[in-house]
Image: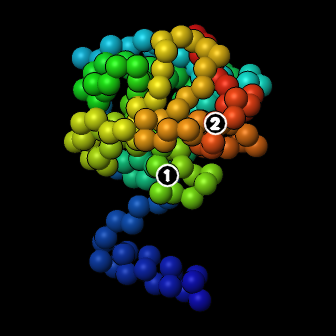
Amino acid sequence: MLFIVIALLYFAAFILAIPIPLPGTLNQEAYEEAHHRDETATRAFSDVQIKTSDGRCLYVDKTSGDFRANLTPIQIAECGTTDGQGWDFITKGEHNNKEGYTLIVSTLTQACFNADPRRKPGSQINLFSCGGRADGSGEVTDSQLWKFDGGKGPLGLTPMNGEGFCLFAADGVIDVDNCNNGTEQVFTLAD
């Protein structure tokens, strides 16, 4: 039944000349509106890898989110094996005005680490337009600011909107959970 509905929608789109975006397809104009490099920012580190305690790296695939590259999951891979493993740590700028906190920005997409406790466990961490608005018009949001001491690690990452919660990497998932000083909650930065 579902196949018939989908086939009818595609047939109607063809007849009416309505484009239907394919999954994993970016709308380039919306993407460029939502994500731009903050040239005024102070970067503690630029284009560094974030390594898990077992030596693997966090990365993003910009086509795994929505049409703007928002809600993009942060994934884990062997270091150096994929694009999207570069990250900027911004300690002051257009989207960060809080001392002792950093924005973690993908150098591939210019989107920010985002902690959203409203989402189900296992999907609470993703990339989103810096400032927290889908179209890139936001200013500063607590869900994108992470406690940061300025060092390369080992370090734990705690979102400003989730006191007592830490970023973790386990079983191929990046998410937040109660801070426990476990190795799955320890990260280092590497050039």
Is 43 drawn above or below residue 118 in the view shown? above
Q: Residues within 10 Å of mark 1 (few under 14, many from 20)?
A: some
Q: Earlier in the sequence, mark 2 or mark 1?
A: 1
Coordinates of residue 60 in the picture (x, y in percent): 55, 36
Q: Is residue 18 left or right of residue 183?
A: left
Q: Is residue 29 left or right of residue 109?
A: left
Q: CA distance from mark 2 to mark 1?
A: 15 Å
Q: Quadrant of residue 76?
A: top right
Coordinates of residue 120 in the picture (x, y in percent): 57, 58
SS label for mark 1: loop
Q: Residues within 10 Å of mark 2 (few under 14, many from 20)?
A: some
Q: Which mark is residue 159?
A: none
**Marks 2 and 1: CB-CB under 8 Å?**
no
Is 76 drawn above or below residue 17 in the view shown? above
Tell me the amino acid under the disc marked 2.
Cys
Q: Looking at the image, which residue is at 55% across and 29% down? A: 157
Q: Which mark is residue 117?
A: 1
Is 63 drawn above or below residue 39 in the view shown? below
Q: Which mark is residue 179?
A: 2
Coordinates of residue 189 in the picture (x, y in percent): 59, 16
Q: Is residue 70 left or right of residue 173?
A: left
Taking depth in this image into account, of 24 and 111 the one nearest to the observer is 111
Taking depth in this image into account, of 146 and 35 the one nearest to the observer is 146
Colour scheme shown: rainbow
Q: Quadrant of residue 154?
A: top right
Tell me the amino acid under the disc marked 1.
Pro
Q: Looking at the image, which residue is at 58% across and 82% down? A: 3
Which quadrant, please, contains the C terminus?
top right
Q: Is residue 109 visible?
A: no
